[in-house]
C-alpha cells in the first residue's frame, strides 16, 4: 500500500506542477460552472426581454377596410404598422422589409356587420428568429378584436355576454419548494457531474501513461522494484483523485452560483409557472448529497480506469487525446440525449447504463425521490463497471508490448 501511495503522490505532484492541468482542474470548473448556470441563463433572459420589447414591422394591405382593427393594432406599442397599397406581401417578408404581412379583404367590415366569419391572411417567415415574437403579438391583437366584436354582437342581440364565461381553473401545485428547486437543478447539475467525472482526470491520465512514454520516463519507472499492479493502482489513484476533486469543485461552484445569484426564471426565490407563482428552494438533503458523492466516486473510478486503459496505447500526448475523444462522445451523447427528453420516464434497465444511470439518479435525488431499487441498481452496476475497468487496466499494464511501444 505504501508503494501505491508513493506512486500516487509522485503523479499528483507532476499534475500540480503542470499549469495546463491545474487550469482545467481548478480554474475552469470554478469559473465555467457559474457562467453556464447563471451567466448563460441571464443572457438568454435579457435577449428574450429585448426581443419582447422590440417593435415588429407589419405591412398591411387593406387596412382602410378594418378601421377598428387598425386602431387596436396601433395602440400596441410593440407593433409598427406600415400601409402597403401594392406589391407582393410575401416578397416583403422574405426580403426582410417587414417581419409580417397582413392582408384584409374589402368585404371585411360588411361581413363583420352581417355576423359572418371573416378571414385575415397573415404572411410570416417561420425560419426568421423573430417569428416566435411577431405571430403571438398579431394573434393576441386579433383575439382581442374578436372579443370586442363578440361583445357588440351580444349587445345587439340583447344577450348577456356572461353566458360565455368558462370554467375558471384554480391551479394548485402539490410539489414542495425543494422538489421545484431540485427539478430546476436537475437540468444542468447531473450533466455537469457526469461530464467532469468523465474528462476531469483526462490530462492526468494521459500524462501518467502516454506522457511518460513520450518523455521516455516509463522505462525507468518499470525498472523500479514495484509490482506492475501497484504501479497501475498508484496511477489510477492519482487520476481518480484529480477527477473527484474536479467533480466536487464543479458541484460546489455551481450550487454556490445558484444560491448566490439565482437561477434563470427564478426571482427572489419565486418562479412563475403557468400563471401561478410558486416558491423555490435550492436546498439539497444531506442524504442526497452523500448518495451523489458515492455515485460520483464510482463514476470517477470507472472512467479513470478507462482513460488509463485507452491512453497507454498512444505514443504521445496528442495521440492519446485523439483516442479519448471518441470514448468521451460515446459516454456524453447518450447522457445529453436522455437529459434533454422532456417528461422521460425511465425503466429500471436505464439505471444499469453507465453515465445515464447517474444522471437519472441525480435527477431523482434532487427532487427528493429515493427509489431503493433504482439506487441499488445504479450502485451495483457502477461498482461492477469500475471493478472490471480497473482489472482491464491492470491487465493491459502487464503487457510489455503495450507499455514499451513507441
Image (cartoon, rainbow, N blue to C red):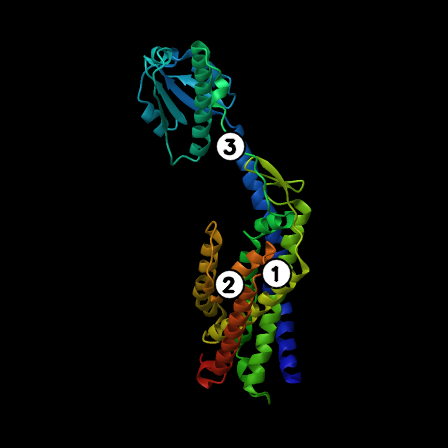
- Secondary structure under tag 1 reads helix
Residue 150: name its quadrant: top left
- Comes first in the chain, label 3 or label 2: 3
Image location of residue 300, percent across then percent down: 56, 68
- Comes first in the chain, label 3 or label 1: 1
Image location of residue 131, percent across then percent down: 42, 33
Q: Label 3 crowding class (10 Å Cα cut-off): few <14, some 14-19, many 20+?
A: some
Disc on res. 51: 3
Q: Which residue is mark 2?
A: 357
- 364 to 11, vertically: above or below: above
- 30 to 136, vertically: above or below: below
User: Foreground residue, 42 or 353?
Assistant: 353
Q: Which residue is mark 1?
A: 23
Side (left or right) of 68 relative to 186: left
**Residue at image coords 63%, 48%:** 176
- 386 to 55, vertically: above or below: below
Q: Nearer the viewer, mark 2 or mark 1?
A: 2
- Secondary structure under tag 2 reads helix
User: Foreground residue, 358 or 60?
Assistant: 358
User: Foreground residue, 201 or 317?
Assistant: 201
- Comes first in the chain, label 2 or label 1: 1
Q: How far separated are the C-alphas under marks 3 and 2?
A: 38 Å
Side (left or right) of 264 relative to 99: right
**Residue at image coords 56%, 45%:** 40
Q: How far separated are the C-alphas under marks 2 and 1?
A: 29 Å
Amino acid at each position: 500500500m505504501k508503494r501505491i501511495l508513493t506512486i500516487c503522490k509522485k503523479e499528483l505532484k507532476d499534475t500540480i506542477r503542470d499549469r495546463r492541468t491545474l487550469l482545467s482542474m481548478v480554474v475552469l470548473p470554478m469559473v465555467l460552472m457559474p457562467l453556464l448556470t447563471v451567466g448563460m441563463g441571464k443572457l438568454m433572459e435579457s435577449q428574450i426581454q429585448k426581443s419582447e420589447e422590440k417593435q415588429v414591422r407589419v405591412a398591411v394591405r387593406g387596412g382602410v377596410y378594418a378601421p377598428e382593427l387598425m386602431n387596436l393594432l396601433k395602440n400596441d406599442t410593440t407593433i409598427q404598422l406600415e400601409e402597403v397599397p401594392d406589391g407582393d406581401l410575401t416578397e416583403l417578408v422574405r426580403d426582410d422589409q417587414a417581419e409580417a404581412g397582413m392582408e384584409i379583404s374589402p368585404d371585411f367590415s360588411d361581413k363583420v356587420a352581417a355576423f359572418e366569419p371573416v378571414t385575415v391572411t397573415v404572411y410570416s417567415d417561420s425560419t426568421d428568429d423573430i417569428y416566435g415574437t411577431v405571430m403571438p403579438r398579431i394573434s393576441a391583437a386579433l383575439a382581442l378584436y374578436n372579443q370586442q366584436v363578440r361583445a357588440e354582437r351580444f349587445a345587439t342581440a340583447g344577450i348577456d355576454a356572461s353566458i360565455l364565461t368558462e370554467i375558471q381553473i384554480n391551479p394548485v401545485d402539490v410539489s414542495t419548494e425543494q422538489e421545484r428547486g431540485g427539478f430546476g437543478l436537475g437540468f444542468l447539475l447531473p450533466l455537469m457531474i457526469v461530464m467532469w467525472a468523465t474528462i476531469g482526470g483526462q490530462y492526468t491520465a494521459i500524462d501518467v501513461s502516454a506522457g511518460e512514454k513520450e518523455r521516455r520516463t516509463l522505462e525507468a519507472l518499470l525498472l523500479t522494484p514495484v509490482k506492475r499492479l501497484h504501479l497501475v493502482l498508484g496511477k489510477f489513484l492519482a487520476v481518480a483523485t484529480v477527477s473527484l476533486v474536479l467533480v466536487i469543485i464543479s458541484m460546489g461552484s455551481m450550487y454556490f452560483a445558484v444560491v448566490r445569484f439565482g437561477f434563470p426564471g427564478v426571482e427572489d426565490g419565486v418562479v412563475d409557472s403557468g400563471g401561478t407563482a410558486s416558491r423555490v428552494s435550492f436546498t439539497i438533503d444531506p442524504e442526497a448529497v452523500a448518495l451523489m458523492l458515492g455515485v460520483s466516486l464510482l463514476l470517477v473510478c470507472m472512467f479513470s480506469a478507462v482513460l488509463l486503459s485507452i491512453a497507454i496505447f498512444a505514443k504521445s500526448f496528442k495521440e492519446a487525446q485523439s483516442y479519448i475523444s471518441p470514448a468521451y462522445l460515446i459516454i456524453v451523447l447518450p447522457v445529453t440525449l436522455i437529459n434533454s427528453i422532456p417528461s422521460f420516464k425511465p425503466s429500471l434497465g436505464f439505471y444499469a447504463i453507465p453515465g445515464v444511470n447517474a444522471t437519472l439518479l441525480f435527477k431523482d435525488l434532487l427532487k427528493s425521490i429515493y427509489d431503493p431499487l433504482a439506487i441499488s441498481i445504479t450502485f451495483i452496476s457502477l461498482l461492477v463497471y469500475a471493478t472490471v475497468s480497473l482489472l482491464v487496466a491492470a491487465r493491459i499494464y502487464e503487457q510489455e508490448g503495450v507499455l514499451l511501444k513507441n
